[in-house]
Image (tube, rainbow, N blue to C red):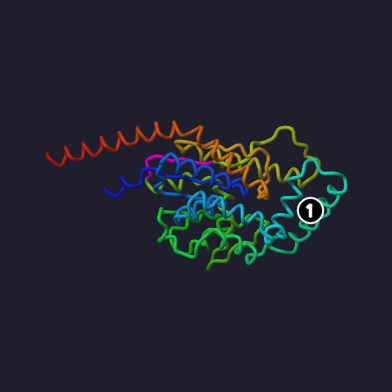
């Protein structure tokens, strides 16, 4: 029976650089022999999940990340510059002034452009991680989730170019311009589906493991400007949507991403380690739930054989 092959579905949530902790989770799964039968990803989860579904190991992914964050391309990128703005809490007055001016420059760019990063610049990063193949040809069945800005619909990629699906799923609003595809204008899947557990459920898996890399809502922030309030409103919306999706997950893994901004790719190695740590803390729960699923499947097979004899 075909459905017996789809036992474990892994859902990798969005969160920008924080999603690099997904690599640590996958590393532990490899070491512990946890099989993954379907991968569903949003945004950075689509990038990591898509690469892994192609057969790229967690060790290879970690090396690709190391090479990328040490490359001249990354050091001169807008993502790196934005990460510097949001990631330095102990910088001096001069650095703070420079960060403020850079921030204002990006705000001005957003008033006249659909994204701070062009599709061409973003494609270069995605192509570094994702091979040029069709989704139908991945070793592990894979689904990427995006949002149609015109209709507000969730778009799930089941076939077609893997690179194009990942680019659409990862197009962070404001930072990366949307992808035009026919009558659709596609942007980050996290707009409406930060952790697409429901997509994994529709795949008919028996056990859904979801990896959440969202930040906790801080209660000690100050909201002094309209921008602060707007960002806070977006955070609350994302938090509620995430909690709603996670209600249907069987196992939830939450790496400690601290307060790292979505542009904080310079923290890549620490994030991968946090993914490993969080996954190890949940391994026994995964094994316990997996045993229950296996017992249930065997019972259904036995019942099916019994009915065939009647």
State the image coordinates of residue 243 (x, y, percent, origin top left): 55, 38
In the depicted structure, whether residue 286 falls above or below residue 187: above
Residue 206 located within the stretch drawn in magenta: yes
State the image coordinates of residue 134 (x, y, percent, origin top left): 44, 63
Taking depth in this image into account, of 49 and 71 the one nearest to the observer is 71
State the image coordinates of residue 245 (x, y, percent, origin top left): 51, 41
Residue drawn 68% across the image and 45% down it: 261
Q: Secondary structure at mark 1?
A: helix
Residue 19 located within the stretch drawn in magenta: no
Taking depth in this image into account, of 38 and 270 the one nearest to the observer is 270
State the image coordinates of residue 124 (x, y, percent, origin top left): 61, 64
In the depicted structure, whether residue 12 falls above or below residue 160: above
Residue drawn 82% across the image and 51% down it: 100
Q: Does residue 214 appear to the left or right of 284 in the view shown?
A: right
Magenta span dominant secondary structure: strand
How many numbered marks appear?
A: 1
Give the residue furthest to the right.
93
Residue drawn 40% across the image and 39% down it: 207
Q: Quick one: label 1, few (<14), some, or many (20+) residues within 10 Å? A: some
Residue position marked by numbered label 1 in the rendering: 103
Residue drawn 61% across the image and 60% down it: 125
Q: The C terminus lies in which quarter of the figure?
A: top left
In the depicted structure, whether residue 190 falls above or below residue 219: below
Q: Which residues are magenta?
A: 205-211
Q: Does residue 42 appear to the left or right of 53 in the view shown?
A: right
Quadrant of the image occupied by residue 114: bottom right
């Amino acid at each position: 029976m075909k459905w017996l092959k789809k036992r474990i579905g892994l859902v990798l949530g969005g969160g920008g650089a924080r999603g690099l902790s997904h690599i640590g989770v996958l590393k532990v799964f490899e070491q512990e022999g946890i099989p993954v039968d379907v991968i569903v990803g949003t945004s950075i989860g689509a990038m990591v999940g898509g690469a892994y579904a192609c057969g790229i190991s967690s060790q290879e992914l970690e090396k690709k990340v190391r090479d990328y964050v040490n490359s001249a391309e990354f050091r001169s990128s807008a993502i790196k510059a934005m990460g510097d703005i949001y990631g330095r809490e102990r910088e001096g007055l001069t650095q703070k002034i420079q960060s403020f001016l850079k921030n204002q420059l990006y705000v001005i760019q957003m008033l006249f452009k659909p994204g701070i990063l062009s599709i061409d610049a973003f494609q270069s990063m995605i192509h570094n991680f994702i091979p040029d193949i069709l989704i139908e040809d991945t070793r592990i069945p894979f689904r990427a989730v995006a949002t149609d800005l015109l209709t507000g619909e969730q778009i799930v990629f089941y076939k077609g170019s893997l690179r194009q699906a990942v680019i659409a799923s990862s197009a962070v609003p404001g930072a990366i311009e949307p992808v035009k595809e026919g009558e659709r204008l596609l942007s980050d899947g996290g707009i409406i589906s930060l952790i697409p557990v429901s997509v994994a459920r529709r795949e008919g898996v028996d056990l859904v493991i979801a990896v959440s890399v969202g930040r906790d809502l801080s209660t000690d922030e100050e909201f002094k400007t309209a921008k602060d309030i707007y960002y806070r409103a977006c955070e609350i919306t994302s938090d509620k949507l995430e909690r709603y999706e996670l209600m249907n997950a069987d196992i939830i893994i939450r790496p400690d991403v601290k307060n790292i901004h979505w542009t904080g790719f310079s923290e890549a190695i620490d994030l991968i380690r946090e993914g490993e740590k969080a996954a190890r803390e949940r391994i026994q729960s995964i094994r316990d739930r997996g045993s229950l699923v296996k017992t249930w499947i065997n019972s259904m097979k036995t019942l099916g054989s019994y009915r065939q004899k009647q």
